[in-house]
Image (cartoon, rainbow, N blue to C red):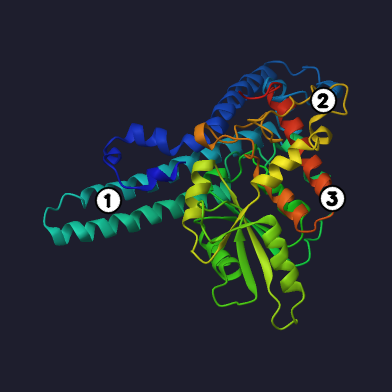
């Protein structure tokens, strides 16, 4: 859901339009779910009339892609370690969640719309404040629903990959952060939470002292305020991995940050400072707005030069060249899409597009490599990200790069 929809508008008087808007985030899963339910009902009926139906050959359970699974309710259920009845119940529960959220948001819309008809200045100011509060309440409801139920009930809650191709087992260990870096926090927009094409969700799987936080979720906002912004802790230096405005004194380059950390490391224990790295996860438009809302004391880290150098040194060969003879190779990165994620998702459009636009995971690893992360460890995490992209491409049939 786009957070612009959180403002009270006259659309609250049009239920059909409101429903279409508020259920956009569930559209893909419900469309898939509807097909499964129809086929499940058909197969159940056929089973009742034919008790001698042959069992599915185990070889047929081999997962080829999503279309292969959806073509058979039994294959789909088995690939998720569920029964057909459990799949149906999961789909019905998700539909109920979507409808309940819609009704709650619509009720808040109606309150905002009813209170916006006053004409005197005092009432207008009061209503404006009320609408802001209602907008915040709607945002919190959406965040809570997304956190509890994610985008799709058939996606792994940890790595955000389709359950049959879950990549959690690839991360058998966690890599320590460079000296002087206390922690990494992946600050995530609610619309990004649970998205299968996301890469930031893998960072906590491969790095120690790394957390995934949703902006707008109360419990996560408390952690962000306490551990990241750290207004009352002089030993913490928060740095957001997002370039500031040109000429802004709050923007630092990677060599400058590395020098700062070296200075901190030479201080005494009771006065030693450590960097906390904030990695924003969201679309370019949402990420920019999130960065702009950060307090002015937070430093902005610009790694554009390092990204260009990383991909111009043929480092991409390891991640973009497939080792499997049965797997279609990833298209080579171009000046407009050097990212590992480019075959699944655009990395910025228009003025936002460019040779330094890469996924959150890639940007984070490149920054940490510049701060002292072992090159072998960085390559290991990036290769796992590439494996996730490969699996999703095979599973969803996206064999060509997005243009």
Read off the residue under disc 1: 112
Give the CA distance from mark 3 to mark 1.
Answer: 54 Å
Give the CA distance from mark 2 to mark 1.
Answer: 52 Å
Q: Earlier in the sequence, mark 2 or mark 3?
A: 2
Question: The C terminus lies in which quarter of the figure?
Answer: top right
Who's the residue at 76% across and 73% down the image?
Answer: 265
Q: Residues within 10 Å of mark 1 (few under 14, many from 20)?
A: many
Residue at the farthest left position: 120
Q: Nearer the viewer, residue 233 or 69?
A: 233
Q: Nearer the viewer, mark 3 or mark 1?
A: 3
Q: Determine whether 3 is above or below 19 in the image.
A: below
Give the CA distance from mark 2 to mark 3.
Answer: 36 Å
Read off the residue under disc 2: 62
Q: Determine whether 260 is above or below 290 in the image.
A: below
Helix, strand or loop at label 2? It is loop
Q: Determine whether 165 is above or below 294 in the image.
A: above
- For the residues labelled 2 and 1, say whether their Cβ atoms are less than 8 Å apart: no
Helix, strand or loop at label 3? It is helix
Read off the residue under disc 3: 375
Residue 37 x, y percent position in the rendering: 59, 26
């Amino acid at each position: 859901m786009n957070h612009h929809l959180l403002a009270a508008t006259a659309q609250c008087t049009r239920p059909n339009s409101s429903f279409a808007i508020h259920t956009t985030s569930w559209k893909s899963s419900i469309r898939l779910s509807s097909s499964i339910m129809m086929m499940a009902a058909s197969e159940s009926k056929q089973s009742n009339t034919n008790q001698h139906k042959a069992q599915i050959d185990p070889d047929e359970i081999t997962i080829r892609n999503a279309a292969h699974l959806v073509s058979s309710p039994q294959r789909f259920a088995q690939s998720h370690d569920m029964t057909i009845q459990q799949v149906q119940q999961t789909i019905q529960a998700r539909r109920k969640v979507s409808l309940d959220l819609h009704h709650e948001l619509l009720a808040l819309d109606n309150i905002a719309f009813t209170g916006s008809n006053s004409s005197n200045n005092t009432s207008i100011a009061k209503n404006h404040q009320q609408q802001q509060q209602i907008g915040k309440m709607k945002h919190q409801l959406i965040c809570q629903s997304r956190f509890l139920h994610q985008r799709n009930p058939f996606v792994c809650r940890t790595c955000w990959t389709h359950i049959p191709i879950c990549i959690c087992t690839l991360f058998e260990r966690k890599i320590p952060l460079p000296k002087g870096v206390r922690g990494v926090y992946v600050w995530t927009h609610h619309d990004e939470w649970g998205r299968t094409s996301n890469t930031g969700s893998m960072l906590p799987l491969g790095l120690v002292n790394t957390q995934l936080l949703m902006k707008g979720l109360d419990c996560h906002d408390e952690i962000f305020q306490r551990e990241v912004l750290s207004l009352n802790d002089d030993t913490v230096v928060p740095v957001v991995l997002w370039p500031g405005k040109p000429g802004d004194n709050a923007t630092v380059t990677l060599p400058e940050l590395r020098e700062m950390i070296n200075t901190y490391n030479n201080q005494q224990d009771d006065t030693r400072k450590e960097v906390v790295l904030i990695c924003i996860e969201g679309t370019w438009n949402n990420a920019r707005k999130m960065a702009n809302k950060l307090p002015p004391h937070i430093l902005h880290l610009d790694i554009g030069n390092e990204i260009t150098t990383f991909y111009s040194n043929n480092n991409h060969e390891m991640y973009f060249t497939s080792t499997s003879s049965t797997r279609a190779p990833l298209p080579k990165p171009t000046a407009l899409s050097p990212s590992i994620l480019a075959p699944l998702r655009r990395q910025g459009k228009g003025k936002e597009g460019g040779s330094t636009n890469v996924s959150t995971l890639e940007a984070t690893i490149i920054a940490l490599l510049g701060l002292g992360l072992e090159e072998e460890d960085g390559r290991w995490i990036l290769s796992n990200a590439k494996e996730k992209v490969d699996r999703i491409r095979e599973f969803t049939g996206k064999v060509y790069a997005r243009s």
